[in-house]
């Protein structure tokens, strides 16, 4: 009998949770008595049980006005502005960062490829996929408390991730993901700057992403595109990503330049991403195109240019697009009609396609299936996590359960507790000490960065602060 037969019920298609959190016992399965002990790798079983929905539907924001809060903040940086909890989504920003890992299969694919340009193509697709979950996610994640952490271990996907809020002013979140088979490391520190411009909120994602493919001794770095949420005051909220993203392979000198196109005057460019891969002599080798909300393709540059010329001849004229689709409306930034299929150029190779969202996503803060699982807390997990883990935050937990009053009360309590702790440190002239990351130099860019110091997965959490 193999191990799968011992622990898998072919009839129900489910793993037995009882073997997960009990110290030591025997159980009879299919006539065989099996001795079961506590499993160190509990996450592989947990992820067989990932939930498909949240405990409660999204809380309505119809009776709340954001204008009363933001009307004095035009042009200001918003990190210090306290927002009502109703405008949040029930995830911490640390959990939101972990959504970069939803399409980890792309990293695994890059690790398996022998050609550096082929690897760059897939890394580019991963960089685009890392922001794809932001589509229609108009809720604000909870600001992490100083010292807050989040762990995500996915043995089924072959990685584990740890993140920590390493600074409060300015707010900086550091993360480090590593392959369980020592194939890759993906890390960075993020300092998002938010500004309110009257009708929209703009998020500048300060911070460098670093992906290391250890087998190939390659390191790639990039900075994510700008993000803008339109119609903050009035109308339907919608999101666009824009700006140039440069992905550099520091080992070969190859570069991928991706242009996340802004909506534009007539909305034809909404969600589009186009770019190219060039070698260190600046010769263009591949063209990358698609939509960050849907899929990405790669094609030979000559084929792309031929198609582009042919397309112009057949009449892709922006003047023919109706003026009503303009993003420059006087009162509202109307969201243009979206054509959700990318025109595929013959000879193109598909690099990535987005995972469809569940049918009830709109009632669940527009979460992806992946995001739906991030705050799940099963019995027995608590004793395996540090007391600083996001899953243990009472305000996020209350909001997830649909209890807006408790969420608001707990959010205010935690913020005041954080302020009181800061006053005490100031009185004693004591500096905050990070637990799992330290400020250092990114060896690939030479820039200042927060680097993982190791030790988290030794499960010694005795010195973790009491922040909740």
Image: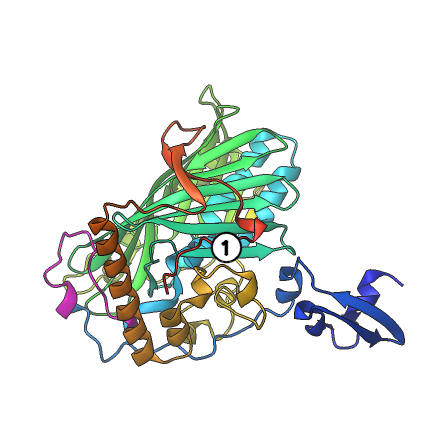
Q: Which residue sits at x=65%, y=62%?
A: 42
- The one nearer the camera, 347 or 201, is 201
**The magenta stretch spans residue 237:** no
Extreme-left residue of the structure: 72
Residue 19 sits in quarter: bottom right
Magenta span contains residue 76: yes
Tell me the residue at 22%/58% (across/down): 200
- Residue 116 placement (x, y as % from top left): 58, 30
**Residue of label 1:** 461
Q: Which quadrant of the figure contains the C terminus? A: bottom left
Most extreme residue toward the top, as rendered? 281
Q: Secondary structure at mark 1?
A: loop
What secondary structure is the magenta-colored segment mainly?
loop
In this picture, is 278 found above or below 70?
A: above
Residue 185 in percent (x, y) is at 54, 40
Q: What segment carries the magenta color?
A: 68-85
**Horizontal placement of 42 versus 448: left or right?**
right
């Amino acid at each position: 009998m193999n191990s799968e037969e011992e622990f898998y019920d072919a009839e129900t298609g489910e793993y037995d949770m009882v073997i997960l959190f009990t110290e030591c016992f025997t159980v009879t399965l299919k006539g065989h008595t099996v001795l079961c002990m506590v499993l160190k790798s509990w996450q592989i079983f947990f992820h067989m049980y990932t939930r498909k929905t949240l405990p409660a539907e999204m809380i309505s924001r119809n009776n709340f006005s954001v204008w009363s809060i933001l009307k004095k903040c035009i042009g200001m940086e918003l990190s210090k502005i306290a927002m009502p909890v109703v405008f949040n989504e029930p995830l911490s920003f640390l959990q939101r960062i972990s959504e970069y890992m939803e399409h980890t299969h792309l990293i695994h694919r890059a690790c398996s490829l022998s050609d550096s340009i082929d690897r760059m193509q897939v890394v580019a697709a991963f960089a685009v996929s890392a922001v794809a979950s932001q589509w229609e996610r108009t809720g604000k994640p909870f600001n992490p408390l100083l010292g807050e952490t989040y762990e995500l271990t996915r043995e089924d996907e072959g990685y584990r991730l740890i993140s920590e809020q390493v600074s409060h002013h300015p707010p900086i979140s550091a993360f480090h993901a590593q392959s369980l088979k020592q194939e890759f490391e993906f890390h960075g520190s993020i300092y998002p700057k938010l500004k309110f411009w009257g009708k929209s909120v703009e998020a500048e994602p300060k911070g460098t992403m670093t992906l290391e493919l250890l087998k190939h001794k390659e390191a790639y770095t990039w900075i994510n595109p700008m993000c803008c949420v339109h119609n903050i005051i009035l109308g339907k909220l919608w999101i666009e990503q824009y700006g140039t993203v440069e992905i550099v392979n520091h080992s070969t000198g190859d570069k991928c330049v991706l242009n996340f196109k802004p909506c534009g005057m007539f909305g034809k460019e909404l969600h589009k991403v186009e770019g190219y891969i060039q070698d260190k002599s600046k010769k263009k080798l591949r063209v990358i195109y698609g939509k960050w909300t849907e899929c990405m393709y790669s094609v030979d540059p000559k084929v792309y240019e031929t198609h582009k010329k042919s397309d112009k001849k057949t009449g892709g004229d922006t003047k023919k697009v109706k003026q009503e689709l303009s993003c420059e409306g006087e009162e509202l930034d109307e969201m243009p009609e979206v054509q959700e299929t990318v025109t595929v150029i013959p000879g193109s190779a598909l690099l990535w396609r987005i995972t469809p969202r569940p049918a009830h996503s709109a009632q669940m803060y527009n979460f992806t299936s992946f995001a739906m699982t991030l705050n799940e807390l099963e019995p027995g997990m608590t004793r395996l996590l540090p007391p600083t883990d996001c899953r243990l935050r009472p305000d996020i937990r209350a909001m997830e359960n649909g209890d807006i009053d408790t969420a608001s009360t707990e959010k205010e309590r935690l913020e005041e507790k954080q302020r009181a702790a800061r006053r005490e440190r100031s009185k004693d002239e004591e500096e905050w000490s990070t637990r799992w990351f330290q400020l250092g130099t990114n060896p690939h860019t030479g820039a200042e960065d927060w680097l993982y110091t190791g030790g988290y997965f030794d499960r010694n959490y005795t010195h973790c602060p009491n922040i909740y």
